[in-house]
Each structure stands twice: as C-alpha cells, then as structure tokens.
Amino acid sequence: MPFWIIHSEDIINNTGITLANPTGVAGTYALAKDVVTQDGVILRHDLSWGGGTAQPVTEDGVYTLSDGSNTIEATVDYSELSIEDETDNVRIEKVSKRYWVNGPGNFYDPDHWSHESGGEGGLIGSPNDDDDIVIDENSFTARGQFINFKELV
C-alpha cells in the first residue's frame, strides 16, 4: 500500500488519478479505488476519499471527492486506471508557498499574496506559521518599497 505525502499546493499522480490543490485539507486520508465488475466486465471504478461516499467513475474527467467535511478534486484518465482494487494512504501537510506581489503594502492584505512569483494577488487569508513566504525580484515595482508588518485594527 503506497503512502503519499503531499503539501497543500502539490499535485500527485498515480496510475490515472491526479489529486490537485487540496487546500484546507490536512491529515491522513485513504484514496480508495474499487473496480465494479459484472461477469468479468469492468462496469466502472468507484473512487472514495477519506472513507467518504464512493463516486462512480466511468470516463475521463474531474471528480469531486469528499470525506464528509473536506473536498478534493481528482482528475481521472480512465484508460490509465488499473484493474485492481487499491487503497493508497495520502498524508496532506498543509504547507504552501506564498509570494509577495504588487509592490509595497500591508503584510495582511490578501491582494499582495500569490501562489506564484509575479502572479496575481488575492489569496484568501494572510500567511500563517505553516506557510513559506517568498519575497523575490518580482515582489516590488521600484527601489525603496517596503512591506508594513503592523496589523491594522
């Protein structure tokens, strides 16, 4: 039984299933794939996440899986799915990189945080202890600009 460790911004791919951007989800989950057959013919694959309700999968596509509290998107390449029932344990550590963008401003302003260097700002929430922050050549638009670390009340 494979054990995947991913971070909240990572993408993992394993035999036809890609899990992407499980933001807000942390912990250890089971990604189960059950093969549903009739007279030896595969009718569908059922995917479930963290013991939640199984989602029938019959073709390529993006499927939303839930453990009852959290959701995650799984992109499926149906032709790549194996014919075996499998369960993989996935531990998601909620760590992400946040890049400062859009020049000078207040540290707590979401308009200055992006998931990529030089990207569009607007991430929900300011960085916390679990996040890596990056200030690089794309953070400012001119010399002498700065980040204000005082929280406005």
Image (cartoon, rainbow, N blue to C red):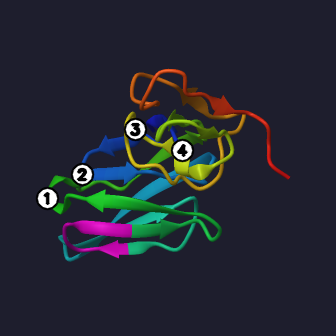
Which residue bears the numbered disc 1? 79
Q: Nearer the viewer, mark 3 or mark 2?
A: 3
For disc 1, the neighbor class at 10 Å (few under 14, some 14 to 19, many from 20) is few
For residue 40, side relative to residue 111 (left or right): left
Q: Find disc 3 in the rendering and name its residue.
A: 116
Which residue, given by chain and number where applicable, does mark 2 sit on?
16
| Marks 1/2: CA–CA distance | 7 Å
The image shows residue 104 at horizontal and vertical percentages of 56, 36
Label located before the other in sequence (1 or 4): 1
| Residue type, numbered disc 1 | Ser
**Secondary structure under the numbered disc 2 in the rendered image:** loop
Is tag 4's residue or tag 2's residue first in the polypeptide sequence?
2
Disc 4: CA contacts within 10 A as few (<14), some (14-19) or many (>=20): many
Which residue is the site of mark 4? 112
Q: In this view, does 49 lie above or below 115?
A: below
Q: Tags 3 and 1 in contact by the CB under 8 Å rule?
A: no
Q: Is 130 included in the stretch rendered in magenta?
A: no
Q: Do the residues labelled 1 and 2 touch (CB within 8 Å)?
A: yes
x, y (%) of residue 56? 35, 75
Residue at horizontal 60 percent and vertical 64 percent from the top:
70
Q: What element carries label 1?
A: helix
Instruction: Estimate how packed mark 2 is, as few (under 14), some (14 to 19) or many (20 or more) residues with alpha carbons within 10 Å.
Output: some
Q: Image quadrant of residue 93?
A: top right
151 on left or right of 27: right
Residue 58, placed above or below residue 4? below
Give the dominant element type of the magenta stretch: helix, strand or loop.
Answer: strand
Q: Is 4 in front, or is 93?
A: 93
